[in-house]
Image (cartoon, grey):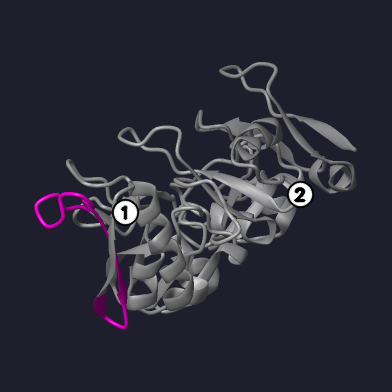
Amino acid sequence: MEKYIDISTPKYPGAFAIIDKEDYERVSKITWRISGGRGKVRCVQRGKTGALSLHRYILELDKNNTVIAKNGNFLDCRKENLVITKPGTKNINLEIDESRQCAILAQHQLDYKTTRVIDISTERYPETYAFVDVEDYYPLLGNGRWHVGVTRHGQYKFAARMAVKDSSRKVEKMHRVVLGVADLQLVEHINGNTFDNRKSNLRPCNHADNQKNIGTKKKKGTSKYKGVKYRPKTNNSRPWQASIMANRKAMHLGYFEVEEDAARAYDRAAIIHHGEFARTNVMLGLLPPTDKTT
């Protein structure tokens, strides 16, 4: 149950802060006011210099600690709304309310009981979200601002933030932070969604294994299916060529009259040669499942 503290001033009449009932007796012994016009409540103690933030006072922290409000409102000083973060963390992602999170998760067939949403949208990439496990949500939310990162050639996008390491600013990728692996360790997103950073969707891999799990690259004049190319000059009656990379070598799988047959030939070979890292046309939703491929 919450209680209310009057923090009004002539500039902000009627302002109040919300605190937990168990903190009311201790907090009410001090005069509080709203300060700075930024929604932060500060303590005014007679005979002492300096100001103390109410959220730090409630958590019994000094000025060396940084605290964020999950809902972005520093007038809401209930303990459940306060998170201790790394010193100097100011620019952060604000928490999305539960109803909106449920709506976003439903669109991606994910469950709010086990998964949370972090808004990493930018002006260039609006309405973009990262998905994480419940236990990773607040540690990630409160430590730096996550945004959409892009590889050098713009081929892949991922959740990233800027972090200071060895006295220099570097890009830190969310999937590596979640798994706690080194900066140079490659991490595969099993379902192909590079914003899905739930631990069940991540696994360390090498470059060869990571390439096995990429989706199809659509180019003008080629097939929409992975592992298939249109080669009418090579075989006019069977223009669709299926091939796969296995053990760092290109393996020819044959020419086919029907494009879908070439795609299924690739799928069968991918299951054999790529194993758990296989990403077939069926998995990509480009072909309907059959008894022969998965």
Cβ atoms under marks 1 and 2 closer than 8 Å:
no
Q: Is residue 41 visible?
A: no
Q: Is the C terminus in the top left, top right, bottom left or bottom right quadrant?
A: bottom right
Q: Is residue 62 visible?
A: yes
Give the foreground label among 1 and 2.
1
- Measured in 3D between alpha carbons, the distance from the residue under mark 1 to the one under mark 2, in whole angstroms, is 29 Å
Left or right: 206 in relation to 90: left
Give the extent of the magenta segment: 230-250
- Which residue bears the numbered disc 2? 113
Q: Is the N terminus in the top left, top right, bottom left or bottom right quadrant?
A: top right
Front one among 217 and 88: 217
Q: Which mark is residue 156?
A: 1
Quadrant for residue 140, please give it: bottom right
- Dot 2 amino acid type: Lys
Front one among 71 and 153: 153
Q: Which mark is residue 88?
A: none
Q: Which of pointers 1 and 2 lies earlier in the amino acid sequence?
A: 2
Task: Please report the residue visible at 84 percent of the width from the left and 47 percent of the height from the top.
Answer: 23
Quadrant for residue 229, please give it: bottom left
Most extreme residue toward the front is 237
Task: Please report the residue visible at 81 percent of the width from the left and 31 percent of the height from the top.
Answer: 4
Membership of 22 in magenta stretch:
no
Task: Please report the residue visible at 43 percent of the width from the left and 75 percent of the height from the top.
Answer: 274
Label 2: how many Cα within 10 Å (few below 14, some 14–19, many 20+): few
Find residue 224 and report its horizontal and vertical position in percent: 31, 45
- Dot 1 amino acid type: Tyr
Membership of 241 in magenta stretch:
yes
Find residue 195 and report its horizontal and vertical position in percent: 47, 52
Q: Of helix, strand and loop, which one carries label 1?
A: loop
